[in-house]
């Protein structure tokens, strides 16, 4: 029997909350959110909070994700954290977020190595891709998406590609508090098609149909339904709205209620 595709609602807390605040917030969320087979809720706190939250969290209710890590196994890499040091705390890891690409100049090669390292560690990489405002203005959205997919996935074999989640986060739509314009569903529909088309070129049509694609960029409780109802969007990666319990819980309720036409 066909089963509906699982939706992912992923909270990227970015560089917010002390460990104490994160723990209190997790406690608050855990009292308000019921586990659901339809929606996988993933929380991505700061690296420093991963270990204590992993002891506190009910993994049937929430999974944890790393916001960042370094792909080498150990060694002289001052300030970095290896997957071997966070394995056991997390089930997912965000890779290639635009803030890492553009604020910290993370290279395409590092991103590809991180995707591969996460897979080797049985951690699901959430590969973030998306065009900048300039690329969009210059009509280069399709090229930006294809290039980021090709390079970010170049170490991933056909056997392993189903272990990857793609998050489409147009850089111009991230952080509404910086006056970025929210994306329209039409922007996302086009990008989702481009992504599946390019994955089909790299790995075949069946895999392109199956891979989970999320949307992220200024999502809040008023816009979430519009994005989640898009056929082919399998969830959301949420920044600022995930820091507010009322917003985040409302988005989760919306995700549980959305009619999902796509089947496995
Ligand atoms: P905002 O929801 O704050 O725009 O952030 C989106 C994002 O970058 C999630 O990874």
Image (spheres, rainbow, N blue to C red):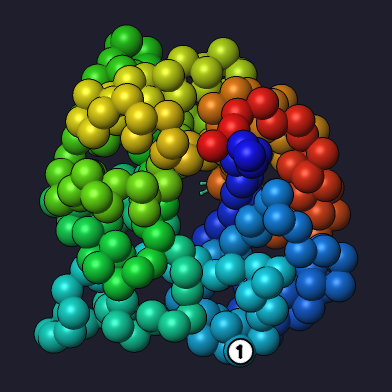
Residue 141 image offset from top left, x and y in percent: 34, 19
Cβ of mark 1 under 8 Å from ligand 1: the answer is no
Residue 9 image offset from top left, x and y in percent: 63, 50
Residue located 52% across and 22% down the image:
188
Q: Is residue 210 left or right of residue 228?
A: left
Depth check, front residue: 77 or 38: 38
Q: Is residue 220 above or below residue 226?
A: below
SS for dot 1 = helix
Residue position for label 1: 55
Residue located 34% across and 35% down the image:
207
Residue 191 image offset from top left, x and y in percent: 43, 21
Residue located 83% across and 47% down the image:
253
Depth check, front residue: 25 or 149: 149
Residue located 68% across and 72% down the image:
60
Depth check, front residue: 192 or 217: 192
Q: Is residue 156 left or right of residue 249?
A: left
Residue 248 image offset from top left, x and y in percent: 76, 53
Q: Is residue 153 left or right of residue 128?
A: left
Q: Is residue 43 above or below residue 154?
A: below
| Mark 1, other Cα within 10 Å: few <14 / some 14–19 / many ≥20 | few
Q: Quadrant of the N terminus?
A: top right
Q: Quadrant of the C terminus?
A: top right
User: Which of the 4 quarters of the picture holds residue 215?
Assistant: top right
């Amino acid at each position: 029997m066909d089963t509906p595709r699982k939706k992912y609602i992923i909270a990227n807390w970015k560089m917010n909350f002390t460990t104490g605040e994160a723990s209190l917030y997790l406690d608050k969320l855990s009292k308000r959110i019921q586990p659901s087979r339809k929606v996988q809720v993933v929380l991505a706190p700061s690296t420093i909070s991963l270990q204590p939250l992993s002891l506190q969290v009910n993994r049937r209710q929430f999974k944890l994700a790393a916001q960042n890590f370094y792909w080498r196994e150990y060694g002289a890499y001052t300030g970095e954290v290896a997957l071997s040091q966070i394995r056991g705390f997390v089930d997912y890891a965000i890779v290639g977020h635009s803030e890492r690409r553009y604020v910290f100049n993370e290279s395409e090669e590092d991103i590809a190595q991180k995707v591969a390292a996460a897979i080797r560690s049985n951690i699901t990489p959430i590969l973030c891709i998306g065009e900048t405002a300039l690329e969009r203005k210059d009509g280069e959205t399709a090229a930006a998406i294809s290039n980021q997919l090709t390079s970010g996935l170049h170490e991933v074999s056909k056997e392993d590609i189903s272990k990857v989640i793609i998050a489409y986060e147009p850089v111009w739509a991230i952080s509404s508090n910086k006056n970025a314009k929210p994306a329209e569903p039409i922007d996302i529909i086009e990008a989702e098609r481009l992504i599946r088309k390019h994955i089909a070129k790299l790995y075949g049509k069946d895999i392109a149909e199956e891979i989970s694609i999320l949307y992220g960029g200024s999502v809040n409780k008023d816009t979430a339904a519009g994005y989640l109802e898009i056929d082919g969007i399998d969830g959301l990666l949420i920044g600022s709205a995930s820091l507010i319990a009322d917003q985040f819980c409302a988005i989760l309720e919306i995700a549980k209620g959305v009619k999902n036409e796509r089947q496995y």
